[in-house]
Amino acid sequence: MFLEIKMASFFLKGIIIVVLVGVAATLVLYNAKLIDVCPLKQVYITESIKKYEETKDPQLCDELNGKISEFNGDCKAELEELDCG
């Protein structure tokens, strides 16, 4: 029984180390601009636009236009802003 606990503890430590190394590597690559977050931002905006089309919430529209404008500036894209009228 003691051996089983020791093995589980060793396995858990290994998992924690792998996760921490993965997070650290992701942060380093992101800060070195080797990971492009523009596709992720575009997916988020697209999903938010779908939600806006369902709700027609004017506050959501204003927030989306701000995010679209920021996305266009950061990612050198040309997404059209929404007509909140």
Image (cartoon, rainbow, N blue to C red):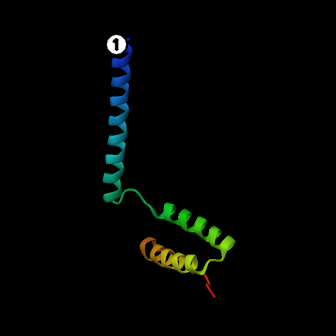
* 1 versus 12 height, above or below: above
Secondary structure, mark 1, is: helix
Q: Residue 69's x, y, as percent?
A: 48, 79
Q: Residue at x 45, y 76 (%)?
A: 70
Q: Residue at x 56, y 79 (%)?
A: 59
Q: List the residue tagged with mark 1.
A: 2
The answer to whether 56 appears left or right of 39 in the picture is right
| Amino acid at dot 1 | Phe
Q: Quadrant of the rendered structure where residue 56 is? A: bottom right
User: Which of 37/64 is in front?
Assistant: 64
Q: Residue at x 62, y 77 (%)?
A: 57
* 50 versus 30 height, above or below: below
Q: Residue 5's x, y, as percent?
A: 36, 18
* 28 versus 49 height, above or below: above
The answer to whether 79 appears left or right of 8 in the picture is right
- The quadrant of the picture occupied by the C terminus is bottom right
Q: Quadrant of the rendered structure where residue 12 is? A: top left
